[in-house]
Amino acid sequence: MACINLNLDVDVNSCLSGLWASLPVLGRPKSGIQKLEKEMARLRGKRDDIKNQIDQADRQGKIPTNEVSQWLREVEILEGKVGVIEQDFQSVSCFSCNCFNQTDGTSSQTQRAGDQVLVRQSSNYCSIIRRVAKELGEANELMSRAGALDPVATVGPLKSTVMLPISHRPPVGIESYVEDIVGYIDGGEDNIIGIYGMGGFGKTTTLNRIQQHYLLKHTIFDRVIWVVASKGCQLKRLQMDIAKSLGLNTLQENDGENTCGDKLCSYLMNKNCLMFLDDIWEHLNLQLLGMAHSATEQGQQQHQQPRKVVVFTTRSETVCAQMKAEKKIKVRCLDSEQAWQLFEQNIDGDVLSSDAGIKFLAEELAKECAGLPLALVTVARAMSGKRSWEAWKEALHQTRDKHEWTTIGLSEDSLVMYKAFKLSYDSLENDSIRECLLYCALWPEDYEINKFEELIPCWIGCGIFDEFNMINEAFAKGYSHLEALGAASLLEKCDSDKVVKMHDVIRDMALLMVSGLQGNKRKWIVKAEIGLSDLPRQEEWQEAERASFMRNEITSLQEYEASTFPKLSMLILHGNINLKTIPPSLFTSMPRLTYLDLSDCCITELPKEICSLAELQYLNLSDNHIIRLQFEFGCLSKLENLFLRGTGLEIVPNGTISNLSMLQWLDIRNIPLVTDWWWDELKCFKGRHQLSVGITINATTDNIQRLNMLPPTVSIWHLTLDGENISKLPNYDLGTLQWGCRVSDNLEFLCIQNLRLDRLELAVGVGRESSLGCLKRLDFRFLNLLEEISLNRVRLNNLRELSICGCPMLNDVSWILQLPCLNFLEIIYCEGMKEVISEVGNSNPISSSSIQCLILWHMSDLNLIANRPFHFPYLEYVQVYDCPKLKKLPFGAEILKNRLKVIKGEDNWWNNLDWDDESIKDSLTPYFRSWPR
């Protein structure tokens, strides 16, 4: 082989001098990049202005013009190019700093290497300068074109079918499972189908998708039933849930399981039924759930009988075998492409496009989730707001830190999910939100937690919001924290906006964090709704700090010795409906108890030993049969929150409540206040803090005046005016000075019920500043003579919810157009109402509404929602039931460009609606759900 060696001696300094001589002509790179950055800042500002115009046009049903869409794409491409230039310049600058500052003492070898680098770096500088000049020209050209982009949007074509919004699109990776299972069901051969796989793999999502498919195909099955089983679920509870979903009232709480099963079978006997059973943990007798199957050996006879099909989800393949599933489908991890697609869907796109380094780290982080859908969503939502490369780098480091995870002892799949949960947990803004998340695990698995009645009061009672003057402020913080947890996908939305749910895997991870990973596996004891008839053995929870035994079947409590539970600070026995007595020793055994929930039991009296709970701050006795408070009750010197709602309380010794110096929240709603103890206690209240009161009073002039005379430290937060116990019409006027500041200034919830009046005016007296400005919910109930409601100088600018029930003479509610923030409207049993809004375009110029949820039930004369086209840009949920004359909806397919999620109603009502164009019905049908089923 011939080999030629060429030795070319090049004068590096001479070459460099030529390169540097050319820089004044091309311009220095740093100054060029500064000019480019300045022009890009102007271009981004223009782009943001155009996007704002597009958003405004979108609310009017318009879409961007093709020219504008193309201009926005070109700006996005240019941003990417400029970002690469800036990264190249920084890397060249950092590297060349060492090369251009060589000392005289360098060796000849080092000098030659440096010379080679200088040539290469100088060449790079020239390349950067040329690229800067090119992109600067593009930026100037795009800026000049921006002025001609008018209009930015145009009316989009009306299509006979409309693409479903993202919430209706198939979730990533499950559509093949859905197609297979639908094929098995439609094939008619397979009647028991099991979907199994680890928690967080998408089993429930798959099941929900199949349910949606059959809800639209109304002729396939007579009944489509959905029921959630959950770990530890009792068969009787499942039977009652099924009966409730069917509207079947024959099942009684005292019926045995066999009796309930017979009733369900009898009702479903001649019906084709499809049942979805979500999250079962053990074998269930389907016959006792009403789904009696014919034996397969009957052959052809099986096809002549009504079909009973069951599709269930479980984490265990063994359960599939126990259930004798004829088809078993294992839900597996997503492949790498699907995993990245799901990750991208759940993160702000601007984050990934802002930095190539961030996108690389995001891809690596997605790989760490090992294709587990729930982990991918949880991590993506946790990182969605992170815009620095360092934050992404730290997140990746945390998930790969072997030292942190080797001691946990979890299976590989569980460890992946725990890493994702821990990352999301740590990414929450503060410890207050983190605490709120953990407390959600106290409720049963898959339980829908009421935000207002359960969750936020729990957070307040646990002292998470320790700095607030009024209960209104604490609730505002609570709703803010709920929003943060929802945005992080750590809490799930439900059909009703009033409740939230914790995914069972997230709940498992939360309980693991507070118990299994902190040395004491019994730090939190949570055995909620698992059918307990007695409390656990003493040694099982003797060292616990928090214990939840809610919604079980506990009938009695044993005696304990003093200080048996020295660390226990929280005890929840809510919902043990047959628990009648509390042994005195229970209180003395828990000296550090700060939170006690005994609500919704059957307790008739509290023992006087309650005074031994010297640290107690939260006490909930709501919905018990207590008629008397012990005098010793007044010794609870640290009590801050007291709930007596729905009790039969009649006897309260003087000073029992008024001497509770730390009290901040008192709930005495729904108590038959036939005595005046409430007035005696509130007028003498000696607390150190502002007391917020929820109360139900007889709607007399004297009582309303009493409210106005309360001391400055007492304010009304929730008020129900009830006329049921009044023998004659009271002489009062809601528009007089009787509405003093004690009533109206901090009032958030007002309910007026059982009054005999034909006209109701919410007004403020002359010269009054108070205007019910904090009011968020307003209820009118069973006002049988009421014909008209009006507002007079009252600005209900914060009113969010309006519910009207049992007002058969009411004409309309056109005054809701004066409520700028109303998002929930419910009208039930108003048989005389013909139009909901009757003044559109006439005396009131407003022709749009902020309503998100509209519910109309039992309105036999209702024929119009509005008497001309009316805009609902925020409408998400519509439910109509027993409104036979309502033949037309006040919107068309344009509503799909907004936020519509579902329309519920009777099949017959939906099929007989009048449409300007049948294509509108075709577009809206995917959103319709038959109800009730």
Image (spheres, grey):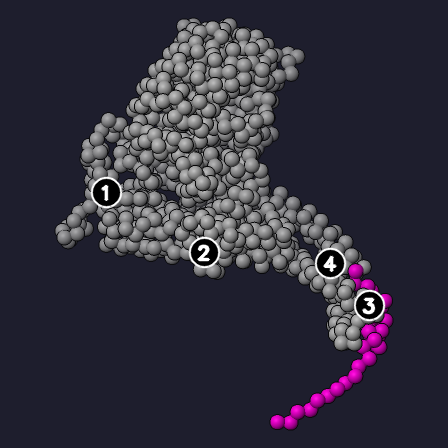
Nearer to us of marks 2 and 3 is 3
Mark 4–mark 2 contact, CB under 8 Å?
Answer: no
Which residue has dot 2 on it? Answer: 371
> Is there a contact, CB below 8 Å, between mark 2 and mark 3?
no
Q: How far apart are labels 2 and 1 at the CA level?
A: 34 Å
Query: Between marks 2 and 3, how big is the CA–CA gap?
Result: 54 Å
Residue that appears at 64% across and 48% down: 51
Q: Position of residue 535 (x, y in %)?
A: 33, 29
Tell me where residue 905 sits by quadrant: top left
- Pinpoint residue 184: horizontal percent, then vertical percent: 29, 55
* Quadrant in the picture for residue 238: top left
**Residue 814 in view of the camera:** no
Apparent side of residue 573 relative to residue 777 in the rendered image (left or right): left
Label 4 – label 2 distance at C-alpha = 41 Å
- Three-letter residue code for mark 3: Thr
- Magenta span covers which residues? 1-30
Closer to the N terminus: mark 4 or mark 3? 3
Residue found 22% across the figure and 33% down from its top: 257
Disc with the residue nearer the chain's start (2 vs 3)? 3
Identified at 38% across, 38% down, the residue is: 445
Position of the N terminus by quadrant: bottom right
Q: In front here: 591 or 335?
A: 591
Which label is found at residue 103? 3
Instruction: Please name which of the two marks, 4 or 2, marks the residue nearer to the observer.
Output: 2
> Which residue does the numbered mark 1 point to in the structure image?
286
In the image, is residue 612 above or below residue 281? Answer: above
Disc 1 crowd rating (10 Å Cα; few below 14, some 14-19, many 20+) is some
Disc with the residue nearer the chain's start (4 vs 2)? 4
Residue 507 lies, with reference to residue 621, above or below; the image says: below
Q: Which mark is residue 51?
A: none
